[in-house]
Image: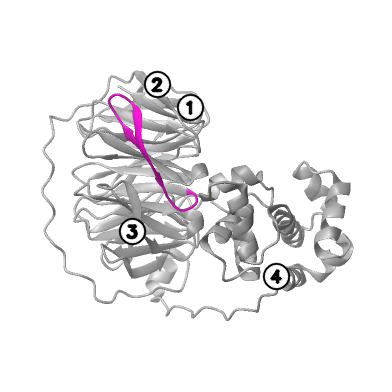
């Protein structure tokens, strides 16, 4: 997730940008000003080539990529110096930059030597960047109304926007016919080589899957048998999580740096629209009736979005932005793992009022729910797997061989696949004994995992540049 302070600084200094330029600024903030090549940056933000990138920046009155990256790096250094007291030499050495080069960069960008730029502080540096572009100071946004004290204490904030005109719930769509569920034999099968750092995978009808590629601004449509790319859908910059509606007609993808949720038409295989979201959308989950989409952002908020209108029904603060969400099978509760806060927050799905918190420690990542809604499993980057018995709130843990992130429960509910992010392996956990029954070596960095509907096959989005099939 991008460093929020630098992102906010750059967005304050450079308002009213086009979506392409805003994506470039957000990418530079994510990398602390350490610029990619123009070609790689264009691929990240979904532009054809470096020439289109240069034209986009020029139209918005921005300097070329190299200069914009220099400004981002200098703002990052000043911010870090103010918060930690570190010298520029220390900061440069930490970032593997020659200190002499760092001092020259500060002077070239701000027109001031480091000692004066440091004394002047961030506000002066931001004003100088704004003056270089010639933009006016923008008025602040209207603040949301106050949150009841009970909710403020529960989530560590004091603001919420209320629900207005929540639509009535339609009957749940009929379940699609499927063969008797099962699970794979846990053998690595085919491997599809792709680019763009595959991150998420979601199954869709007709034996297809969607794979997000954050570094290529694209979602691949992949056939599961045989493993092959059917189509590539262009999206906004940094598509991260993708969820499919219950009828299998639309998918929703969190385009982080576009600050939107893209709407993918699964008939035409293209992004047909977008839902604007304040901040960078991270995790997403859809209600069982398909009428509400829940989206978490890096502004530490959870939104409930009405579908298909795309209208935000409610917004509530959460202890920390989440890449993963899950909705209870009843549709009455939403569960949000709050990353470094080490807690799972249970919220009422209709009002977004917090109900309970479950302390799991570590860094809570992916979550899955059993079909009967009694057990919530949590992959933890601290190096373990949690099982939460929801009726009693009891939390149990299983120690793993390393940090885990991705998590998937087989359709027959008998095994869990847990991605060991830095070990290049998938741990196979027997749900009846809650013990590791085997491992699958994938290599690379296995991110998120999904089973096809019958359970015969699972796909793993591997950030090293592959989609791995487990059968």
Label 4–label 2 contact, CB within 8 A: no
- Looking at the rendered structure, which numbered label has been put on residue 294? 3
Ranked by sequence position, the earlier of labels 4 and 1 is 4
Ranked by sequence position, the earlier of labels 3 and 1 is 3
Ranked by sequence position, the earlier of labels 3 and 4 is 4
Q: State the separation of the CA atoms marked 3 and 4.
A: 37 Å
SS under mark 3? strand
Foreground label between 2 and 1: 2
Ranked by sequence position, the earlier of labels 2 and 3 is 3
Inspect this view and state whether residue 112 appears.
yes
Foreground label between 4 and 2: 4
SS under mark 1? loop
Q: State the separation of the CA atoms marked 4 and 1.
A: 51 Å
In the displayed structure, 265 sits above or below 131; it is above
Q: Position of residue 143 (x, y in %)?
A: 48, 79
Ranked by sequence position, the earlier of labels 4 and 2 is 4
């Amino acid at each position: 997730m991008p460093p929020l302070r630098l992102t906010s600084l750059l967005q304050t200094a450079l308002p009213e940008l086009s979506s392409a330029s805003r994506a470039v600024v957000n990418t530079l903030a994510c990398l602390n000003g350490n610029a990619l090549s123009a070609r790689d940056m264009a691929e990240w933000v979904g532009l054809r080539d470096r020439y289109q990138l240069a034209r986009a920046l020029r139209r918005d009155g921005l300097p070329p990529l190299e200069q914009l990256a220099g400004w981002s790096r200098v703002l990052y250094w000043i911010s870090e110096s103010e918060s930690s007291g570190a010298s520029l030499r220390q900061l440069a050495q930490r970032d593997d930059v020659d200190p002499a080069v760092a001092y020259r960069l500060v002077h070239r960008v701000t027109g001031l030597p480091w000692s004066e730029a440091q004394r002047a502080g961030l506000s002066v540096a931001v004003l100088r960047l704004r003056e270089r572009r010639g933009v006016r100071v923008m008025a602040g946004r209207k603040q949301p109304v106050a949150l009841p004290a009970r909710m403020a204490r529960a989530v560590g904030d004091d603001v919420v926007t209320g629900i207005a005109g929540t639509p009535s719930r339609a009957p749940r769509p009929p379940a699609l016919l499927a063969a008797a569920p099962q699970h794979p034999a846990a053998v690595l099968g085919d491997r599809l080589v792709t680019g763009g750092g595959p991150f998420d995978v979601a199954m869709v009808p007709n034996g297809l899957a969607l794979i997000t590629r954050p570094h290529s601004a694209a979602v691949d449509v992949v056939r599961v048998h045989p493993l092959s790319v059917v189509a590539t859908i262009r999206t906004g910059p940094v598509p991260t999580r993708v969820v499919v509606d219950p009828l299998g007609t639309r998918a929703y993808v969190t385009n982080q740096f576009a600050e939107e949720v893209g709407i993918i038409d699964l008939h035409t295989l293209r992004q047909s629209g977008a839902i604007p979201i304040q901040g960078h959308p991270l995790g997403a989950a859809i209600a069982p009736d398909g009428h509400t989409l829940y989206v978490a952002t890096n502004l530490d908020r959870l939104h409930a979005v009405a579908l298909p209108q795309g209208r935000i029904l409610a917004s509530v603060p959460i202890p920390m932005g989440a890449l993963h969400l899950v909705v209870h099978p009843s549709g009455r509760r939403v569960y949000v793992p709050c990353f470094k806060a080490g807690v799972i927050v249970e919220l009422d799905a209709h009002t977004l009022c917090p109900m309970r918190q479950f302390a799991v420690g570590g860094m809570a990542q992916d979550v899955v729910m059993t079909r009967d809604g009694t057990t919530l499993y949590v992959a933890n980057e601290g190096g373990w797997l949690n099982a939460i018995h929801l009726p009693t709130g009891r939390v149990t843990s299983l120690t793993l061989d390393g940090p885990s992130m991705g998590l998937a429960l087989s359709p027959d509910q008998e095994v869990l696949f847990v991605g060991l992010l830095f070990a290049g392996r998938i741990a196979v956990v027997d749900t009846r004994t809650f013990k590791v029954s085997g491992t699958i070596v994938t290599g690379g960095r296995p991110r998120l995992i999904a089973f096809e509907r019958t359970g015969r096959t699972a796909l793993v989005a591997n950030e090293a540049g592959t989609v791995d099939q487990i059968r």
